[in-house]
């Protein structure tokens, strides 16, 4: 009997299954440091930060110097500007441009020009030039703090004196005339500072005045107003 060399084909036979070899087993010990994949989100590496800080340690002095220079570049211009402004204020011919132990610096409250004395008014006896204080360029209230002053235009010390005695309703304490090369009015009036010896004509009182000379300003002339007691130098 002859053996059949051909396999029979049955169209209703079950499907053929091919089983391959099992996949290679991968050790998981080095997954975190290898290139096989990421198993968790990246985290800060404290070792890198420590290494960075250690690298800066040799340059510590240089870094401190840089910080100091930056602070000086920021603060020094501000300090210099404040010093310049302080040296320039108040303007020439204003109270506070010099200082004396008995007369603190005044506060600026007004620079409204006062009306010039009328030419028809008789000159005040106190405005005789022989009675003026000379070589002075600062005026203040003795032991006073925060007195007001008013700057007004005047052509001469006599005119400034006349404004003080005839054109200050609240009562003039004193006047100072200093001619400068600036636009600052030459006549400085201190009106109505509260003091002792109150009278009907001087309801705020008659304080004492202080005059002095600051070498940085031109010499001027000054005198008492109707509401002042005396000059203390």
Image (tube, helix red, strand yellow):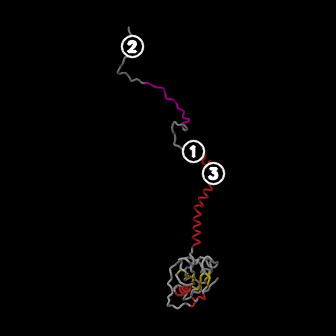
Q: Which residues are magenta?
A: 18-31
Which structural element holds mark 2?
loop
User: Are dots 2 and 3 in contact, CB under 8 Å?
Assistant: no
Q: Which mark is residue 45?
A: 1
Mark 3 closeness class: few <14, some 14–19, many ≥20 residues within 10 Å: few
- Identified at 62% across, 48% down, the residue is 55
Q: Camera-side residue: 191 or 217?
A: 217
- Identified at 52% across, 91% down, the residue is 122
Instruction: Residue 115: give x, y in percent of width and height.
Output: 49, 84
Which structural element holds mark 1?
loop
Query: Which residue position is annotated with label 2?
Result: 5
Q: Mark 1 or mark 3: which is in front?
A: 3
Q: CA distance from mark 1 to mark 3?
A: 23 Å
Which structural element holds mark 3?
helix
- Identified at 57% across, 91% down, the residue is 125
Q: CA distance from mark 1 to mark 2?
A: 72 Å
Query: Which residue position is annotated with label 3?
Result: 59
């Amino acid at each position: 009997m002859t053996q059949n060399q051909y396999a029979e084909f049955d169209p209703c036979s079950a499907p053929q299954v091919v089983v391959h070899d099992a996949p290679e087993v991968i050790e998981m010990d080095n997954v975190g440091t290898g290139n096989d994949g990421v198993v968790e989100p990246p985290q800060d590496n404290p070792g890198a930060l420590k290494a960075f800080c250690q690298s800066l340690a040799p340059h510590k002095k240089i870094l401190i110097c840089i910080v100091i220079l930056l602070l000086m570049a920021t603060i020094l211009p501000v300090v210099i500007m404040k010093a310049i402004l302080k040296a320039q204020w108040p303007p020439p011919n204003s109270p506070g441009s010099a200082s004396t132990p008995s007369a603190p610096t005044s506060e600026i409250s007004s620079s409204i020009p006062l009306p010039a004395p009328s030419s028809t008014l008789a000159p005040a006896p106190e405005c005789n030039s022989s009675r003026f204080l000379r070589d002075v360029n600062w005026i203040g209230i003795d032991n006073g703090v925060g007195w007001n002053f008013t700057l007004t235009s005047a052509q001469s010390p006599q005119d400034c004196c006349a404004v003080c005695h005839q054109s200050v309703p609240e009562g003039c304490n004193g006047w100072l005339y200093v001619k400068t090369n600036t636009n600052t009015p030459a006549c400085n009036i201190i009106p109505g500072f509260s003091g002792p010896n109150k009278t009907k004509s001087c309801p705020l009182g008659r304080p004492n005045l202080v005059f002095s000379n600051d070498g940085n300003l031109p010499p001027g002339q000054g005198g008492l107003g109707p509401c002042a007691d005396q000059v203390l130098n």
